[in-house]
Amino acid sequence: MNKQILPSFLAADLGHLADELRRAEASGADAIHLDIMDPTFVPNMSFGPSIVDFCRCTCPGFYRNVHLMMNRPDLYLDAFMKTGAQTIQVHIEADCDIHTELRRIRARGLKNAIVVNPETPIEALAPYIGEIDEALVMTVHPGYGGQKFIESCLLKIAWLRERCPNLDIMVDGGINAETAESAAKAGANQFVAGSYLFAQSDMRAAVDDMRRRIA
Ligand code: DX5
Ligand code: ZN
């Protein structure tokens, strides 16, 4: 299966966003992961559609993976589609009709994904499996970068991989070279890493090393 590594822009140095984005692209990573937060869904706020536009203008060829940690993603989908999101991920815990939103994303020619929080049983994903391009298994409670990987989420990845051998399964939260390797063994093939990758003075070497570990 195609393995992908996605630096999370949330961990970039805010004083140098354009350079940080170029550094992530030059590292050989596959896409930039953009964490959009609404404070009614997580205990934090981050950025909005303009950051997606900024990424499109700064590094047009660098794929944009947009993670909507929002209670009402339905109200903002158009804005993210217009500004250049290429994959849009909505939480199963959101307060809207998920089937409708997944269809709207695909109807615009984008990839869709559904996200499950650590406390949500993975079985909740079953009704959506035929209509998603990828599943994102959160390996921390969403809202902040730099948290510790929750080991018990590995079981959810294994459950999903057993049932969906060809589905893209992403992990997000507390990913470094070691936890990426554990997640890969459980069946994940896409890896978001924020604080780990952006803290590296040589991001390319860290991406190469992670690629070897998840191979
Ligand atoms: C958490 C976000 C993550 C976060 C990951 O709410 O969804 O994408 O940026 O950061 P690290 O890799 O530092 O755990
Ligand atoms: Zn994320």
Image (cartoon, grey):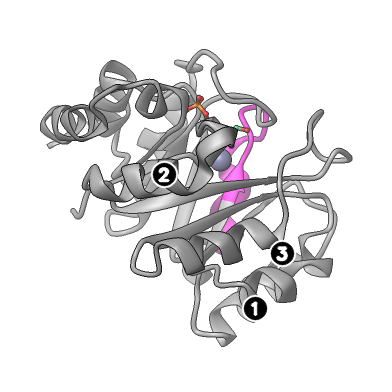
Q: Earlier in the sequence, mark 3 or mark 2?
A: 2
Magenta residues span 115-128
- Please identify the quarter of the rendering in which residue 31 is found: bottom left
Q: Amino acid at mark 3?
A: Ile
The answer for how far apart the CA atoms under marks 1 and 2 are is 24 Å
Vertical order, 142 against 200 (above or below): below
Q: Is residue 64 magenta?
A: no
- Does label 3 or label 1 sit earlier along the sequence? 1
Quarter of the displayed picture in which ligand 1 can be seen: top right
Label 1 neighbour load within 10 Å: few <14, some 14-19, many 20+: few
Q: At label 1, which amino acid type do we have? A: Lys
Q: Residue at x 77, y 49 (%)?
A: 70
Tag 2: amino acid:
Asp
Q: Which residue is mark 2?
A: 19
Q: Which residue is mark 1?
A: 82
Which marked residue is nearer to the observer: mark 3 or mark 2?
Answer: 2
Name the spot of residue 49 as percent of width and height, x first: 69, 62
Which one is in front, 80 or 92?
A: 80
Is disc 2 surrounded by few (<14), some (14 to 19) or many (20+) residues within 10 Å?
Answer: some
Q: Does any portion of residue 104 appear in the rendered image? A: yes
- How far apart are the alpha carbons under marks 3 and 1? 20 Å
* Residue 109 % position (x, y): 49, 84
Q: Kindly tell me whether residue 89 is visible in this rendering.
A: no
Give the SS element for disc 3. Answer: helix
Q: Is residue 115 left or right of residue 166?
A: right
Q: Position of residue 125 (x, y in %)?
A: 58, 51
Disc sitting over residue 98 in the figure: 3
Tell me: 10 left or right of 209. Answer: right
Residue 88 left/right relative to 120: left
* Residue positioned 66% across, 35% down in the render: 120
Left or right of 89: which side holds 160? Answer: left
